[in-house]
Image (spheres, rainbow, N blue to C red):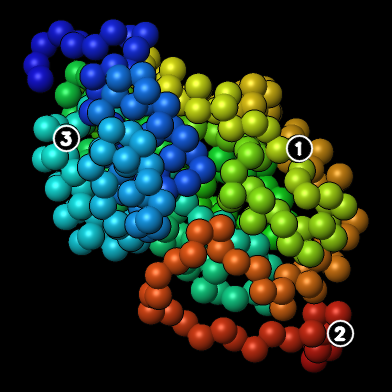
Amino acid sequence: MTGAHLFSTASVAGRRILITGAARGIGAALARQLHAKGAKVALLGLEADLLAEVAHECGDAPWRYCDIADHRQVERVVSTLVTELGGLDVVVANAGIAKQLALLGGDPAVMEETLAVNVLGVYYTLRAAGPHICHPDGYALVISSLAAAVNLPLVGAYSASKAGVEALGNTLRHEVRHTGAKVGVAYFAELDTDMTARGFGTAAARAILGRSTVSGVAPLGPAIDAVERAIARRKRQVVSPWWVAVALPFRPIAQRVIDMALRRGVARALEIARTEEAPFTTDQPDRPRKMERPAWPDIAHPTPRSH
């Protein structure tokens, strides 16, 4: 593609779109909606049976199993899917996981897995798909989170990873601007997905919040509509619900409000989280661990200092 833009800024029809994490949640709903609006989608993810169902609902769209934390798999699968699509106009780096973690005394494997999937996986996706969308109609959308801007206890691994995703998106925007391609970053609060249900449905989370979520679960539909519009117009920022757009420019104030609101229950929640068997929001393949879990001292009775 060269020269003038080929697509209407009001429609996704005809666009060739690669979506990661497309087996369920945001990825699956987005694939179905984009297909219904005339886009050509390709899907990748971990859950082969679910991916196959979504692909069938999208006109037997091309799909592949792919662990996005494995850069060799990502390079191979993206190359294959782009070939099957006949090129690429849009990549949506949506795949991500979450799991509660007490930063002090929690299992370091949770941090490692979260960063491997949410940060390195997005990087590998952009690295593999990026060259294909470096044209005047190209667009990359990375799915960050309000958690990148406002941080909660027990969500440190997820928040750190989504802040990394935000940084990758903002950096890539600079690096591809000369090609005519654009980059957007999506910020969502708690949407009605399996990730929200599994991520907040723990005893430790309830000990802090006294309920299942912080801001209440928002319907998924408006978020998918917002992403569709963002792809059609190659927008810089996507939010859902609407009030996230108000919170983002006032991050320090929003953080202060959260700090004051969540003081109660944190100590008890941390105690629960260190032993609670909470799952990742999507089951992960076995990967080698980089470190063993260290012994953790009793912070309620710290060792006295010597003077």
Where residue 3 appears, x then y in whole percent?
11, 11
Instruction: Choose the circle earlier in sequence order: 3 or 2.
Output: 3
Labels 3 and 2 touching (C-beta < 8 A): no
Q: Nearer the viewer, residue 256 or 205?
A: 205
Examine the rendered structure and indicate whether residue 65 appears above or below residue 192: below
- Where's the N terminus, which quadrant? top left
Instruction: Say how many tags the image has.
Output: 3
Instruction: Choose the circle earlier in sequence order: 1 or 2.
Output: 1
Instruction: Choose the circle earlier in sequence order: 1 or 3.
Output: 3
Residue indicated by mark 1: 215
Where residue 119 appears, x then y in whole percent?
42, 53
What is the three-letter code of the residue carrying label 3? Leu
- Where's the C terminus, which quadrant? bottom right
Looking at the rendered structure, the secondary structure element under dot 3 is helix
Labels 1 and 3 touching (C-beta < 8 A): no
Which quadrant of the figure has residue 189? top right
* Residue in the picture at 18% in, 11% down: 6
Circle number at residue 301: 2
Which quadrant of the figure has residue 250? top right
The answer to whether any part of residue 171 appears in the image is no
